[in-house]
Amino acid sequence: MDKLYAKLEFLNPTGSFKDRGTATMLSVAREYGVNELVEDSSGNAGASVSAYAARAGIKSHIFVPADAPEAKLRQIKAYGTEVHPIEGPREAVTAAAIEYSREHGLVYASHMLSPYFAEGTKAFAYEVVRQFGEAMPEHVVFPVGNGSLLIGAFNGFKEQRDSGLIEKFPRLHCVQSRSVMPLVAAFNGEVWNSGSARKTVAGGISIAAPSRQWQILEILRLTGGSAVAVEESGILQMQRDLAEEEGIFAEPTSAVAFAGLEKLSEHGVINEGDTVLVPVTGFGLKDEPPPPCPSPVA
């Protein structure tokens, strides 16, 4: 594919796209005089909120899965936040954070629900238009959990289309791990429920019940997008391929989108001559090192 572009979102200050939303959300929090807040995260959002809260002089409590990658936990702790590890599925972490915020009368600064966070992620779309100009990509392929980047990108592209800066949207596509695929199942009419969820190497999108599922599905339909799921082995292989062939060390969650791109190409959704953009949402150093490739059988 000659017109494939990677947008290196891991070059944001804390190593993931989450900084786009956090910068706006924490600026508003400081403006309103917030001095202590609660967030829940599988890692990247927690690191981002911790960093920006530290800069704003706001005390932060970050609720994380007990099995979150050690590298992400080290980064979160480095900013002086109070970390609360929670056993159980990702949804249990969210529930614990909400309960804690209510019990202690604190702001729940959720990157999943905050309208200010969503406003911040629109900057992705504005940058894409500025960088591509009239040669806009026909497709943008996202790894999707709660969909904050996809939703922000849609809103940003819509604003620019409505103001006459661009003529039409790129088609926005959603990729998930087959281990946790509520959006893919809902979009394609497949049978799946949260009880079917399994542990995935793509922890950043391990969301069995997305809070904005209806909105994500509507965006896919409005833009002519698709939703596909990829196997765990394909995610890890793509992570290695990106590093060894392109010099891009992406976390597994980011590799999901590239693995999904292969599938979309195989299915004829994306053609060889199409211009395609894939955001590399997080840096590989923020996750566990990939397991070694198995030795070839003699």
Image: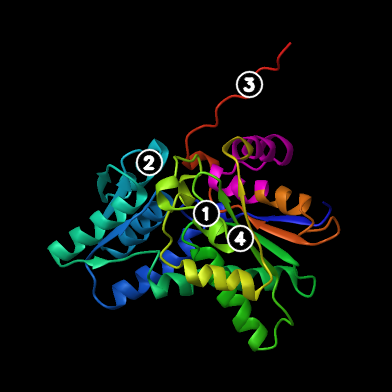
Residue stretch in magenta: 235-259
Residue receiving disc 1 = 191
Looking at the image, which is closer to me, 6 or 292? 292
What residue type is disc 4 on? Asn
Residue receiving disc 4 = 188
Residue receiving disc 2 = 68
Whether 194 is drawn above or below 56: the answer is: above
| Disc nearest the viewer among 2 and 1 | 1
Whether 212 is drawn above or below 276: the answer is: below
What residue type is disc 1 on? Val
Mark 4 or mark 2, which has the lower sequence index? 2
Residue drawn at the location 38% of the way across and 52% of the way down: 47
Tell me whether circle 4 and circle 2 mark residues in contact (CB < 8 Å).
no
What residue type is disc 2 on? Ala
Mark 2 or mark 1, which has the lower sequence index? 2
* Secondary structure state at the residue bearing disc 3: loop
Mark 1 or mark 3, which has the lower sequence index? 1
Asked if residue 252 lies in the magenta stretch, the reply is yes
